[in-house]
Image (cartoon, rainbow, N blue to C red):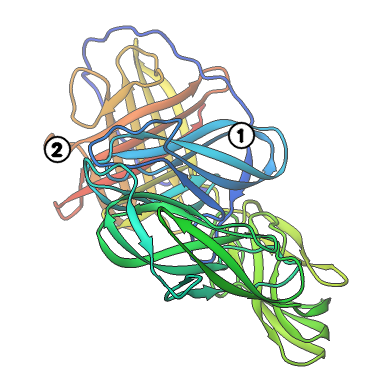
């Protein structure tokens, strides 16, 4: 706790109240872990199901997104997305086992308009993105299209294959095949190839326009058999053709984890970037292509791909992705003929008890002091203070005219005879706001209150008045504390 410095306030002359039933929220141990994601920030893996049509209400059991979570601590969970274009996704429940768990989020709402919507999924301070395509109103049926091809038997035209196809190595999100299709009717599609040599290629979504365009299929499975060209048949509607991918034997190698040099900074809750790399020595026994990916550990994955041109000792660099879920030192296992581990130390996330965004800037910090006391029975004045290392300070006062602060109660900075709030914020040494002007309005909502443990949490948003007199919009406001 930091020492909170000098902000005082008084609210008085609060009139009339109506007694409400006290709400009590029991405690539960929340799960801890991280969402699995690619370096681009997209959820890995991700499966979007259902048809999304503008102005048509979504069906929770049909319109879903399935993602993976690396669970570090079992317990209850709530995984949500933001609201985009009139709809959102969420899921809740309990994780009963650690490791990789699959979670299906169900849609709620009605899309306003057609287009591609990008959703950000959040869980335990980690994030990843999923794209959903919404069709125009009335176009929710299946698309009509043909895969362009030539010759007899038909070979798919304009094929682009990406990624390495190494016998014995699982395919990943980078293993894609792009085909050319001619769409005559917009709508949804779901295409899956035949399974050949352990590999299947599939894709689903929606076409928003007619004409010639690309269709991307993502590979899954583990390549088997003798390395070489593999012909994969695919059918869509009345059209059929085949494409080729080339499997290879791949390199064989082993790491010397004692040489690992970990670069970059690692903090719980902060996504890794291109600066988070590991330089490590590898002894190549057989030259050839490689795709290396460590097992997800504490939300982190380190990977590299390429080709070893020669045998013997050499150095490669693994690039990190994902978001560390917890602080501590974690041993990252690397694959190879002989596996080993290297340590990555993650600093704990800073304590965040209060947070809000004003305009384009986000402020956050920890609780400094919190007190609930009777001012003039039955009036109860809840005083909250917080600060951070940047010398930002926040003060929140909730004045309850009934003497009890209940879950789902609202408090407004527009002074009235009802429940009232006061919000003051100091950015460094500059007074940012003292919201007492009735033309500005912040609304606080109590989201949980355990009167036995004396813990209180709430959210707030609205508009405030800056020191210069301008109006700032506040979003994503929250606070939590244990009070005296």
Question: Which residue occupies the foreground of this view, 317 or 218?
Answer: 218
Q: Residue furthest bottom?
A: 310
Of residue 112 and residue 75, the one placed in the foreground of this image is 112
In terms of secondary structure, where does tag 2 sit?
A: loop
Q: Position of residue 305 (x, y in %)?
A: 65, 77
Q: Which badge, 2 or 1, comes first in the chain's sequence?
A: 1
Q: Position of residue 344 (x, y in %)?
A: 72, 65
Residue 220 picture quarter: bottom right
Q: Which residue is identified by label 1?
A: 30
Q: Is residue 175 left or right of residue 316?
A: left
Quarter of the image that includes the N terminus: top right
Q: Residue furthest front?
A: 152
Q: Label 1's element?
A: loop
Quarter assignment of residue 292: bottom right
Q: Position of residue 289 (x, y in %)?
A: 70, 81
Percent across and percent down for residue 439 are 11, 37
Asked if residue 429 can be seen in this view, the reply is yes
Closer to us: 3 or 226: 226
CB contact under 8 Å: marks 2 and 1: no
Relative horizontal placement of residue 310, taking residue 355 as reference (left or right): right
Residue under pointer 2? 437
Q: Which picture quadrant has residue 360? A: bottom left
């Amino acid at each position: 706790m930091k020492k909170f410095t000098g902000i005082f306030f008084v609210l008085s002359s609060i009139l009339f109240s109506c007694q409400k039933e006290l709400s009590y929220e029991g405690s539960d141990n929340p799960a801890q872990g991280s969402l699995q994601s690619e370096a681009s920030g997209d959820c890995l893996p991700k499966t979007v199901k259902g048809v999304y049509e503008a102005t048509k209400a979504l069906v929770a059991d049909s319109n879903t997104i399935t993602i993976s979570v690396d669970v570090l601590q079992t317990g209850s969970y709530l995984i949500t997305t933001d609201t985009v274009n009139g709809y959102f996704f969420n899921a809740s429940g309990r994780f009963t086992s650690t490791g990789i768990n699959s979670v299906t989020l169900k849609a709620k709402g009605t899309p306003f308009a057609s287009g591609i919507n990008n959703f950000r999924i959040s869980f335990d301070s980690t994030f990843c993105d999923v794209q959903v395509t919404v069709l125009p109103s009335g176009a929710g049926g299946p698309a009509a299209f043909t895969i362009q091809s030539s010759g007899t038997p038909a070979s798919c035209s304009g094929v682009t294959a990406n990624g390495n196809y190494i016998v014995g190595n699982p395919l990943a999100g980078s293993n894609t095949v792009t085909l050319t299709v001619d769409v005559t009717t917009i709508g949804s599609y779901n295409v899956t190839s035949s399974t050949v040599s352990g590999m299947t290629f599939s894709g689903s979504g929606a076409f928003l326009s007619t004409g010639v365009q690309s269709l991307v299929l993502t590979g899954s499975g583990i390549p088997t058999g003798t390395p070489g060209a593999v012909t994969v048949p695919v059918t869509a509607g009345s059209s059929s053709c085949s494409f080729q991918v080339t499997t290879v034997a791949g390199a064989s190698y082993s790491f010397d984890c004692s040489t690992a040099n970990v670069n970059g900074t690692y903090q719980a809750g902060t996504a890794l970037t291109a600066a988070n790399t590991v330089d490590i020595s590898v002894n190549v026994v057989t030259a050839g292509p490689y795709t290396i990916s460590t097992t997800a550990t504490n939300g982190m994955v380190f990977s590299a791909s390429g080709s070893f041109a020669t045998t013997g000792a050499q150095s490669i660099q693994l690039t990190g992705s994902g978001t560390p879920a917890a602080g501590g030192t974690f041993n990252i296992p690397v694959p190879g003929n002989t596996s080993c581990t290297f340590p990555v130390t993650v600093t704990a996330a800073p304590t965040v008890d209060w947070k809000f965004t004003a305009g384009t800037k986000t402020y956050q910090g920890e609780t400094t002091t919190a007190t609930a006391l009777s001012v003039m029975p039955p009036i109860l004045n809840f005083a909250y203070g917080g600060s951070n290392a940047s010398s930002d300070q926040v003060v929140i006062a909730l004045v309850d005219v009934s003497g009890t602060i209940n879950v789902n109660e609202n408090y407004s900075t527009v002074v009235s005879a009802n429940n009232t709030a006061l919000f003051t914020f100091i950015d460094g040494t500059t007074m940012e706001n003292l919201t007492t002007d009735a033309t500005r309005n912040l609304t606080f909502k109590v989201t949980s209150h355990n009167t036995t443990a004396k813990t209180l949490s709430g959210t707030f948003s609205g508009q405030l008045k800056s020191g210069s007199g301008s109006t700032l919009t506040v979003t994503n406001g929250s606070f939590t504390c244990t009070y005296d």
